[in-house]
């Protein structure tokens, strides 16, 4: 008797054998952004979604669906600009004969560069954007296997962070997670960043300018200062003041442990440690972190794996060679093969 997982593998093998899988094809979908309407930063709500799929595959072909969340500053627009030469197409091509699937690349950028794919009163409802708007739009357009192996939520860096958080909070919607070099273990990886001189040099006037509404906002030229402002906006928003967030230092430049605690409360490693049911037993979880990751993302990914390995029915950690953003096509392909149950 075939199990649901065996049936999935059989169905995917049948699809692969019955169609001519020549090269990846790009579909561009318009997402109205109802969930991002009237966001506090005045960022555009209507955005594009880039969907890469095997050539000659009809929309009603039941292939696994992967929703991919790019890292900080990247978006679907980068993939659209690269067209069929985008690296996501290479992943589709790489897996076409054995694991045909569709990969949808999201635009989750904010004024600061990223959203961490969280709901925040300082940036917008980016978690809802993925789960309540993008996912329904994709499932309405494309057929997916009914066995429970799809959809997969995946991402790299801050997108890997978003994949972990959505996977934790939306057990019923995302049956598998692929997190490549995800933001985590903040006490190890992020604390050094927020202690940098350019971050400590941010003044109250600079914060006021950055949080100004609409086109009146002025962000600092320093990229690290902008990044930390954006992370504060995602992790420490002021609930009753849209667009406002709490800074990690007070007006005298003293460290605010209470704000840092708000960061830690959204650290994937802390969430996994504090919640035995952070992930459902049925979810398949793949984590990686490069050997020479300059941000130390491999540290947090391995620690999360060590927490989950005795809890989850299927969890894997891989430490590839290279740096933070190296070899992403191969890394994503490896993770997808695992979470789809083909390894």
Image (cartoon, rainbow, N blue to C red):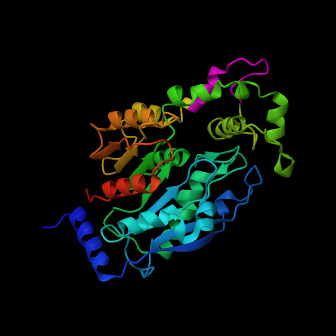
Query: In this picture, is 252 found above or below 93?
Result: above
* Residue 249 relative to residue 56: left or right: right
Residue 27 placement: quadrant? bottom right
- Residue drawn at x 41%, y 51% is 178
Residue 172: tell me if it is visible.
no
Residue 273, horizontal then vertical, whole percent: 40, 31
Residue 170: tell me if it is visible.
yes
| Outermost residue to the left | 1
* The one of 285 and 181 positioned closer to us in this rendering: 181
- Residue drawn at x 50%, y 49% is 156
Query: In this picture, is 272 found above or below 89?
Result: above
Q: Quadrant of the N terminus?
A: bottom left
Residue 266, horizontal then vertical, whole percent: 54, 36
Residue 47, horizontal then vertical, whole percent: 66, 64
Residue 340, horizontal then vertical, whole percent: 32, 59
* Residue 90 relative to residue 230: left or right: left
Magenta segment boundaries in residue numbering: 247-263
The answer to if 249 sits in the magenta stretch is yes
* The one of 324 and 215 positioned closer to us in this rendering: 324
The answer to if 293 sits in the magenta stretch is no
Q: Quadrant of the C terminus?
A: bottom left
């Amino acid at each position: 008797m075939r199990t649901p997982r065996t049936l999935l593998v059989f169905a995917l093998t049948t699809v692969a054998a019955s169609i001519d899988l020549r090269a990846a094809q790009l579909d561009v979908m318009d997402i109205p952004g109802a969930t991002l309407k009237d966001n506090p930063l005045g960022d555009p709500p209507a955005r594009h979604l880039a969907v890469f799929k095997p050539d000659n595959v009809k929309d009603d072909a039941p292939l696994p669906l992967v929703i991919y969340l790019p890292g900080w500053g990247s978006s679907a627009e980068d993939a659209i600009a690269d067209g069929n030469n985008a690296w996501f197409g290479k992943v589709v091509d790489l897996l076409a004969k054995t694991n045909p699937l569709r990969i949808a690349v999201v635009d989750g950028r904010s004024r600061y560069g990223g959203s961490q794919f969280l709901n925040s009163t300082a940036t917008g409802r980016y978690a809802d954007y993925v789960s309540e708007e993008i996912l329904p739009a994709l499932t309405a357009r494309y057929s997916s296997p009914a066995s429970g192996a799809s959809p997969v939520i995946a991402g790299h860096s801050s997108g890997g962070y978003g994949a972990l958080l959505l996977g934790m909070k939306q057990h019923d919607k995302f049956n598998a997670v692929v997190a490549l070099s995800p933001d985590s273990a903040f006490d190890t990886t992020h604390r050094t960043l927020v202690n940098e001189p350019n971050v400590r040099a941010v003044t109250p006037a600079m914060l006021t300018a950055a949080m100004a509404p609409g086109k009146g906002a002025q962000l600092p030229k320093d990229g690290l200062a902008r990044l930390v402002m954006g992370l504060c906006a995602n992790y420490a928003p002021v609930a009753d003041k849209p667009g406002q967030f709490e800074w990690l230092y007070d007006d005298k430049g003293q460290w605010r442990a209470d704000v840092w605690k708000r960061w830690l409360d959204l650290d994937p490693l802390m969430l996994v440690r504090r919640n035995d049911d952070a992930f459902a037993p049925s979810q398949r979880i793949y984590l990686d972190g490069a050997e020479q990751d300059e941000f130390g993302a491999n540290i947090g990914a391995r620690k999360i794996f060590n927490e989950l390995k005795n809890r989850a029915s299927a969890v894997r950690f891989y430490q590839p060679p290279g740096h933070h953003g190296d070899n992403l096509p191969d890394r994503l392909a490896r993770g997808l093969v695992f979470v789809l149950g083909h390894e």
